[in-house]
Image (spheres, helix red, strand yellow):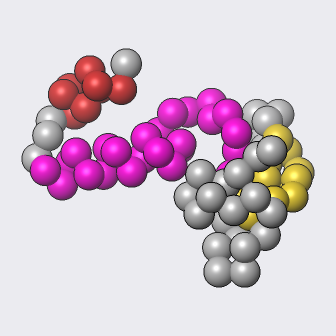
């Protein structure tokens, strides 16, 4: 069962394919309605990684420090 990582909703539908060929999904939650992918080609597009980087930058961590933790 696939769940959307942002709101943990289990009601999702396939929503076409990206130009990279990966499947795109749509969250059917009435308040969310966001699109997502299970596997991201660019890790910066992954919501979990993006959230971590934003929090680290807010705490004045350097880009090189963030890079070490993501590898």
Which residue is farthest bottom?
A: 30
Quadrant of the image for the N terminus?
top right
Label count reads 0
x and y, in percent, of residue 41 in the image: 62, 30
In the image: residue 71, left or right of residue 67: right
Image spot of residue 29 (x, y percent):
72, 73
Looking at the image, the residue that sits furthest to the left is 60
Q: Quadrant of residue 34?
A: bottom right
Q: Position of residue 63 (x, y in %)?
A: 22, 33
Classified by dominant secondary structure, the portion drawn in magenta counts as helix
Q: Nearer the viewer, residue 28 or 39?
A: 28
Q: Residue at x 42, y 47 (%)?
A: 50
Question: Is residue 26 visible to us here?
Answer: no
| Front-most of residues 27 and 17 | 27
Left or right of 13: which side holds 32?
left
Answer left or right for 18 relative to 38. Answer: right
Quadrant housing the C terminus: top left
Residue 4 on image: x %, y %: 67, 54
Residue 8 visible to the viewer: yes
Give the residue displayed 67% in from the left and 33% down from the top: 39
- Decide: is 11 above or below 44: below
Residue 37 sits inside the magenta stretch: yes
> Which quadrant holds residue 69?
top left
36 over 30 or under it: above or below: above
Q: Identify which residue is drawn at 13% across, 50% down.
A: 59
Q: Which residues are magenta?
A: 36-59
Q: Residue at x 25, y 32 (%)?
A: 66
């Amino acid at each position: 069962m696939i769940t959307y990582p942002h709101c943990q909703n289990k009601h999702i539908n396939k929503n076409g394919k990206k130009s990279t060929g990966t499947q795109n999904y749509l969250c059917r939650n009435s308040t969310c309605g966001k699109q997502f992918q299970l596997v991201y080609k660019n890790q910066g597009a992954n919501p979990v990684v993006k959230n971590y980087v934003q929090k680290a930058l807010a705490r004045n961590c350097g880009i090189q420090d963030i890079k070490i933790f993501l590898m």
